[in-house]
Structures are given as C-alpha cells and as structure tokens.
Image: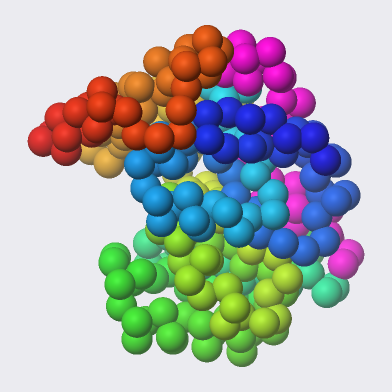
Amino acid sequence: MKKIKVLNLEIDNLSQSEFLADLESGIVFTPNVDHLMKLQNDSDFVQAYGISNYKVCDSQILLYAAKFLGTPIKEKISGSDLLPAFCNYHKHHEHIKIFLLGAREGIARQAQQKINHKIGRKIVVDSYSPSFGFENNEQECRQIINMINQSDATVLVIGVGAPKQEKWIYKYREQLPKIKIFMALGATIDFEAGKLQRSPKWISQIGLEWLFRLYCEPKRLWKRYLVENLPFLFLIVQQKLNFYSNKKKKQNRNFWKMADKF
C-alpha cells in the first residue's frame, strides 16, 4: 500500500472503493489540516496516531498540499462520506454490527435509527452520546466499555472530535475484544442524524468546506480555522524546500504561545 508523506504523517494513498475492499479489521483515522497541526505539538496525539492501521485523507486542502509536494493522493475520503459508504458496502454482511459513540445527548440514537432505516437492517446495534469531558471520567468510560462489549458490536464509530477520539481508542482499544474495526470520524454522527448541515458538494470540491463549517459553527471553530491552522501552508512550503523538521521550531513554539492567549 503506497503512503504519501505530508509533514510528519504518512497518509494511505487509496481510493474509497479500494479502501472499503481492503478494510477487514484495524484502526481508521481520517487526517485533515487540523490533525496535521495538532500532530506538530501534541506528543500524545502522535502516539495515538501511531497505532492506526489506516490514515485516509479527509481534506481537499491536504489533496492540494500533496499535489504541490509532487505526491498526489488519489481521493479524499471524508468521514461523512465514509460511514454511509461503509454501511451500504456491508448492507448484507450480518457480521458487521456498529456501535455509535458521540454527539450530544440523543443525537447518536437518532443517527442509529436513520442509518438502520436506510440500510434496511439493524446494522447499528447500539449508540451512546457521552457527557462533556467524559474522557476524563473513568466511571463513565467504564460504563461505555461495558455497553459496547454487551452490544455484540464488531465496529466502533466514535465521533467526539480530535484528538479526544483518537486518544480514547488508544487508551481503551484493548478492553474492547469484540471490536474488529475502530473508526474515528468526527462530526459524522451529527451529519447522519441530520443535526449538522453538510457543505454543498461544489464547496467541498474546491477546498472551502472549512469556510462553510466556520459559517455554521463560528463560536466553536473560529480558533481552529483562523488561528491554529494558519501555519499549515508555511510548513508545507518548508517541506517542499526540504526545510521541514518534525522537531518543534522556535517560531512554531512562539506562534502557539501567542495562539493560546486568544
């Protein structure tokens, strides 16, 4: 499987059809610009990413960056496209049973109902919307693990945002022996429940989905898109010129100190 190096991450160069045919087990992460920037400074996130078996591109901007670097990626495989495609691909595969973990209270249950209705069988066997800050609540995490293990699910789809979802999989994966496929898919559960509006296809295709999401959720996303992700293009130019280093550089540390003040 060919991998494309973007900054300090190797991304699998697969089309969606190739990926679905190849995916029988493993841990799936969907890197985007926000992930790449967090991976520059968060060693725990880097460690979590290290256990993933698949890293598929979830960003048109990453597609542009890879092409600029001379190593184009075949296709963007966003989480919001991947989950419905995965469910449809396994429509008649009764051993595929999904547990949805994420979104606000009640939304995961709505997503479960809508997915099962579309697929025509109970492909999503259970769901749970955790409380805010659940990742720091060992009692709730224990409750979640018990729910997943009792559900007979073989696939866990977690959508609580990066880096929480990836770190949660890293910490608890070995306590979920029945789960064969782990997928960290961000806001996908909200999209499936109809609680978040997806950007028009043409906006996504030209790389402005981030702007549409910023318009929809300005209070939550302004810092990510307008502050934290700004150095990405600078780092890509560094990589193109063979100046990029995985090590933190002084200017990057200074930038993050300034960003933390916002």
Say which of 10 and 168 sits in front.
10
Residue 88 visible (yes or no): no
Image position of 45 (left or right of 240) = left
Image position of 183 (left or right of 7) = right
Image position of 38 (left or right of 201) = left
Say which of 37 and 137 sits in front.
37
Span shown in magenta: 64-93
Q: Residue at x 57, y 54 (%)?
A: 50
The picture places residue 184, in percent across and down from the top left corner, at 56, 55
**Where, quadrant-wise, is the C terminus in this rendering?**
top left
**Where, quadrant-wise, is the N terminus in this rendering?**
top right
Image position of 97 (left or right of 45) = right
Q: Residue at x 46, y 66 (%)?
A: 168
Residue 119 visible (yes or no): yes
In magenta stretch: residue 77:
yes
In magenta stretch: residue 124:
no
The picture places residue 176, in percent across and down from the top left corner, at 61, 80
Q: Residue at x 52, y 66 (%)?
A: 170
Residue 113 is drawn in which quadrant?
Answer: bottom right
Say which of 56 and 143 sits in front.
56
Question: Quick check: 249 above or below 83?
Answer: above
Q: Residue furthest left?
A: 261
